[in-house]
Image (cartoon, rainbow, N blue to C red):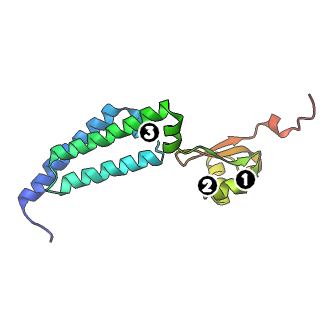
Amino acid sequence: MFFSNWHSLGRTVVVGGLAYVALIVLLRASGKRVLSKMNAFDLVVTIALGSTLATVMLSKSVALADGVLAFALLVLLQFLITWLSVRSKTVSQMVKAEPALLVHRGEVLPRALKQERVVEAELLAAARNHGVMSLSDVEAIILETDGSFSVIRRSPSSERTSSHP
């Protein structure tokens, strides 16, 4: 069906606009953490917020107040989890992954690549993105908790042997 009635379209515009505004206000009020680079937990919350927004906009059986309450609940739960993760190592470990060392002193760590499901071509691309043409010029490549790669260049002093005291 291409068109049901004007009332349905009007409801989508009004409720969708108000739900969108409510979501933006809640996100801004919740602080920068909600909008920061995402780990897996943040991604799930973001997808849930988007799904809730779509449901509120398109489902006539979901009232705007219900949708705003759902937004507030998701934002509150994320705030609670992040607040707890700062205060509890156990909660932090459950919610956040640890960074993984993939290259150390120019040497690829095959076990780490396999565990993190990363291929060497991705390491080379990350190095190039950081202006490094060869992994031998890399002190370390780290897969960060948000999925990005940190590339640390070798310093000229680290290439020397440490045989002198």
> Could you tell which of marks 1 and 3 lies nearer the N-terminus?
3
Q: Amino acid at mark 1?
A: Leu
Q: Amino acid at mark 2?
A: Glu
User: Could you tell me which residue is drawn at 62 percent across and 57 percent down?
Assistant: 118
Image coordinates of residue 86 in percent, x first then y, are 48, 31
Secondary structure category for the residue under label 1: loop
Relative to 84, is 6 on the left or the right? left
- Split into 4 quadrants, where in the image is the N terminus? bottom left
User: Could you tell me which residue is drawn at 36 percent across and 51 percent down?
Assistant: 47
User: Could you tell me which residue is drawn at 50 percent across and 44 percent down?
Assistant: 94
Residue 51 falls in image quadrant? bottom left
| Residue nearest the observer in this picture, 94 or 59 | 94
Foreground: disc 3 or disc 2:
2
Mark 3 crowdedness (10 Å alpha carbons): few <14, some 14-19, many ≥20: few
Residue 75 falls in image quadrant? top left
Relative to 156, is 161 on the left or the right? right
Q: Gap between marks 3 and 2, in whole Å?
A: 22 Å
Relative to 104, is 10 on the left or the right? left
Q: Which residue is mark 1?
A: 109
